[in-house]
Each structure stands twice: as structure tokens, then as C-alpha cells.
Amino acid sequence: MDEELRSLADRLRDEAGPSADAVAACDRLVATADLEALAGVLTAAEQPLWAREVAAFRLGCAGDRRAFEALVLLLNHRDPERCVSAAHALEILADPRTPRAAAALATNELRAAYALMPVRLLTRLRAPESVPALITALRRRLVPGDPHWRVGLACVEGLGELRDERGRGVLEAAVRHPKLGIVAVIALERLRGQVDGGGAGAGLR
């Protein structure tokens, strides 16, 4: 059992309890190699959230695209630990729909409070959708008084990691933000180093 699955199993075993039967059911889902049984959990009625999460995570890590919709829902959940597990499984799943879904979640202003993991996943995916979505999300976080500065910070870090010249304008604006400024300066330095070292197009992805 890898570390991610072990962490998920420990968390959801606690959530499934205190019933011994529920804990045993959780352990069976964690251990089973039967992908059809896992897929059945996603389609069966009245399954608890912990069971759906185990099934989606296991299927996603096995490369089974039947997990995609459930994982996308979990990626934007109010519980940060569910978001982290979903992002891990989606990255392994490598479904071509993932970048577009993550970009939609990252830029959905109605769910801005839960956009942290979609933003971080977009950075790791390095997809064509990544930079435009991070620019859009960061620009919204620069509004005075915006409470979701941690999402903005993840956008700044992501744009610095991706080193795409298209992010320069919004990063320069972020320099003036009291909580994002220092990281924005570092991101601009990374962008400047990429351009100086390999030409103006070297950072484009």
C-alpha cells in the first residue's frame, strides 16, 4: 500500500466508524483488486461519501476513467483532504478531460473558496489550459479585500513554476498585494531567468 492510499485509508476508516461492519467494509474497498466492484460503488444508490471516495481514488489510481466524474466533484470539496486525494488520483488517471475540468473549477467564482487544489493540479499538469486559468483566477484574487488570498498565492507560485511570459502582467500586479508581493517578485525572477536563458518563447507551454 503506497503512502497516499494508506493516508486515505486511515482517514476514511475513522469516518466510516464507529461501526465495526462499516470499518470492515472500508478495509475491503481499500484492499480489493476488483475494479467492477469499485465501479459499482460509484453507481449504487445511497452509498456513503467515504465509500465513493475510496472507490473513485482506487479506480483513478488504476487508470480506470469511470472514476473521472467522482474525482472532479471531490477535487472541489469543502474538505481539503478530499481535494488532495482527488488531485493525486486525477494526476495518475491522466484523463484528457482533467485540465479543462480543473480550469473550470479554478475559475468558478462561486467556488473560489475551494479552488486551491484545482489551481495546484493545473500547475502540475502543465496543460494548455493551465496558464490562462491561473491568470484568470489570480486576477480575481487581486481585488482589494478578497478573502481567498491562499488561492492567489497558489496561482502566483504556479505561474512562477510554469514560467510562461503570458503571466507577466498579472504577476507584476500581484507585486503590490500585501500577502502575495514577495512570492510574485520571486515568480517574476523565475520568468526573467527563463526568458534571459532561452529566449522570449522558452517559457511558453
Image: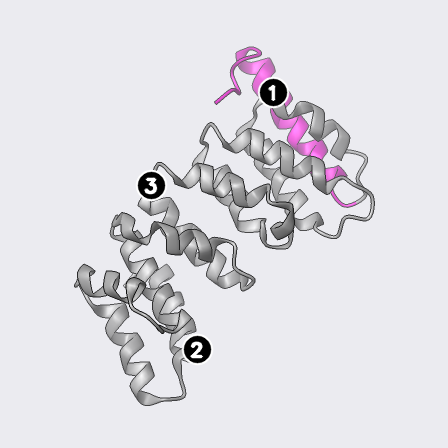
Q: Which residue is mark 1?
A: 165
Residue at image position (24%, 64%) is 40
Q: Which residue is mark 3?
A: 94
Task: Name the magenta segment's main secondary structure.
Answer: helix
**How was this image coloured?**
one colour
Quadrant position of residue 97: top left
6 horizontally vs 127: left or right: left
- Within the magenta stretch, is there residue 195? yes
Q: Which residue is mark 2?
A: 15
User: What stretch of residues is rendered in magenta?
Assistant: 179-205
Residue at image position (43%, 72%) is 11
Q: Crowdedness of circle 3 by 10 Å Cα count: few (<14), some, many (20+)?
A: some
Quarter of the figure that contains the N terminus: bottom left
180 horizontally vs 167: left or right: right
- At which x and y percent is residue 42? 31, 63
Marks 1 and 2, the one that precedes in the sequence = 2
- Tell me the distance, in whole angstroms, between the alpha carbons under discs 2 and 3: 28 Å
Residue at image position (34%, 70%) is 51
